[in-house]
Image (cartoon, rainbow, N blue to C red):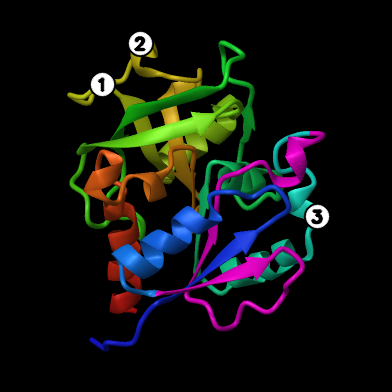
Amino acid sequence: MTNKKINFGIVVFPGTWSDVDCHNVVTNVLNQSAKYVWHKDTNLSEFDCIILPGGFSYGDYLRTGAIAKLSPVMNAIKNFVEKGKLVLGICNGFQILCESGLLPGTLIRNKNLKFKCSWENLRIENVNSPFTNSCQKNEVIKVPISHGEGNYFADPNTLEELTINNQIIFKYSSQSGKISDTHNPNGSVENIAGISNKNGNVLGMMPHPERCCEKILGGTDGKKIFQSILNQLASN
């Protein structure tokens, strides 16, 4: 194993605001390297992992992520993904990944039509993922959410495919891991909080792991997601 730092690229669209939080985690908590990537940039060759942070890209006009998917950086990210490299989309980043076709399904308005900001329990559905290899099967982690359009929706055929391919990575649950409507903060189908692509190198999740990597913020479970990425890249 080398001591070479892992290099993260953190994409910034007009309206992105969780970029600084992600940068802080990568550099100050994980002691890795991070650079901001403006949405017009197209050269991602120096990066090992790309993060699409939360926020309100282009003010969420038309639909969340609908304009951001047209930014020049997205073609570069598609090429990045085709090379098997890792991409993590958080909240608005998840929405952008769905809009761009890098992940199946879509994110629609929360069931109660209200913006939801709270800590939620997530049950780990797949630990054989580059993003959850430091977790235990059915482990429950606590991660905050902050969104108005986090209601994940996909048609029955897509849901069946997600299940067969183990692409469902997180589900909203109780503290003990029970899956029910009571523990679904936004109405997401089957309580889905995060999914991957078929190859497993792209993850989209609505909760914000970058907001819970330090005790002073109220929890450190989010660090497991980032540590899993480091584990994966160190093993390559």
- Residue 24 location, x and y as percent? 41, 61
Q: Is residue 201 visible?
A: no
- Residue 88 location, x and y as percent? 49, 56
Kindly indicate whether the residue at mark 3 contacts the one at mark 1 (C-beta within 8 angstroms): no
Circle 3: residue type: Leu
Q: Is 178 part of what is drawn in magenta?
A: no
Kindly indicate whether the residue at mark 2 contacts the one at mark 1 (C-beta within 8 angstroms): yes
Relative to 184, residue 19 above or below: below
> 224 left or right of 38?
left
Label 2: element kind: helix
Structural distance between the alpha carbons of marks 1 and 3 = 38 Å
Q: Residue visible at 20% across and 43% down?
A: 137
| Dot 1 alpha-carbon crowd within 10 angstroms: few under 14, some 14 to 19, many 20 or more | some
Structural distance between the alpha carbons of marks 2 and 3 = 37 Å
Structural distance between the alpha carbons of marks 1 and 2 = 8 Å
Residue picked out by circle 2:
182
Q: Residue visible at 73% across and 72% down?
A: 41
Circle 1: residue type: Ser
N-terminal label among 1 and 3: 3
Q: Is 52 part of what is drawn in magenta?
A: yes
Tell me the tag on residue 174.
1
Q: Bounds of the magenta span?
A: 33-62
Label 1: element kind: loop
Tell me the tag on residue 70.
3
